[in-house]
Amino acid sequence: MYFNFHDHYSFYKDKETSLSILEKEKIHTLFVSMNLEEYLSLKETFSDHPLISIGLGIHPWEVKKENNLKSLEPYFSSCDFIGEIGMDFYWAEQKEYYPQQKEVFEFFLQKAEEYQKFPNIHTKGAELEILSLLQKYNVPTPVIHWYSGPLELVEKYLEEGCYFTIGPDVGYSKITSELLQILPLDRILSETDGATSVEWVNGIYGEPDYIKMIVESIAKEKHLPLEQVREQLYQNGQNILPK
Ligand SMILES: [Zn+2]
């Protein structure tokens, strides 16, 4: 069995085909949402699907001047986890919304603490700020998605109990290679970040079963037997997801 610990349903072009691959291969998948609208539609499509967990979040790229956070309140009790949330001081186009990004992210961390649901976090360019907020709130097992920040912060993230998802660029990126050398095997998870994120890295459209390639690459980079890595990564996912 495999976990895809960070995937985007909306990025799949032929959703029926992708879903049938996911089910055939029994890939337990965490679909993040970019905003409330996407969360509600995921919930409607997949409520009680045995292989799918659904996150409630506002992606940093979706943060606006006004964010009506109150409207999210009714949904925290029923989401499986919090995400995609975070801050992005690199790709996010509207710099004038940086203060709002922090406000929205902190709101979600408070909810993660209050409802004891783990967050799935995007950190691009905001790694130091996010670390200091994780030190402030007592959220369950933060999952750090596709980390590409300063490697000297990784130890501090590990001290906060964080797990790291390794995804499409494993085997292609020097920083991901270096990150993998630092991370203990029991803090690593696998992700695709959606079919088109894989495509963005290597031109291959990443159907759900591409997760096998990612786990294989992780094993190669860690110089460990594939079976050991596959089992440990699955165990790691089980440690985090509520039963
Ligand atoms: Zn994502």
Image (spheres, grey):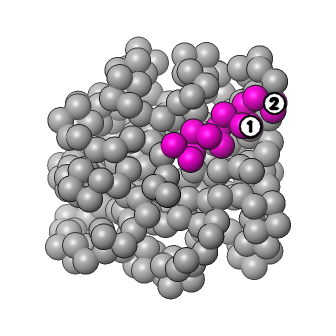
Give the residue displayed 56% in from the left and 59% down from the top: 30
* Residue 130 position within the rendered picture, expressed as x and y whole percent measured from the top left: 29, 36
Q: What is the secondary structure assignment of the residue under circle 2?
A: helix
Q: Which residue is mark 2?
A: 226
Give the residue displayed 57% in from the left and 39% down from the top: 236
Indicate the quadrant where residue 231 lies: top right
13 sits to left or right of 149: right
Q: Which residue is mark 1?
A: 230
71 sits to left or right of 179: left
* Residue 57 position within the rendered picture, expressed as x and y whole percent measured from the top left: 36, 62
State how many labels appear. 2
Dominant secondary structure, magenta: helix
Binning the other alpha carbons within 10 Å of mark 1 as few (below 14), some (14 to 19) or many (20 upward) gives many
- Say what amino acid the circle numbered 1 marks: Arg
Does residue 35 show up magenta in the picture?
no
* Residue 9 position within the rendered picture, expressed as x and y whole percent measured from the top left: 60, 68
Q: Which residues are magenta?
A: 226-239
Give the residue displayed 38% in from the left and 50% down from the top: 118
49 sits to left or right of 96: right
Is residue 220 among the parts visible in the rendering?
no
- Say what amino acid the circle numbered 2 marks: Leu
Asked if the residue at tag 2 contacts the one at tag 1, i.e. Cβ–Cβ closer than 8 Å, the answer is: yes
Front residue (pair 157, 225):
225
Q: In this view, which residue lies farthest toward the front?
A: 243
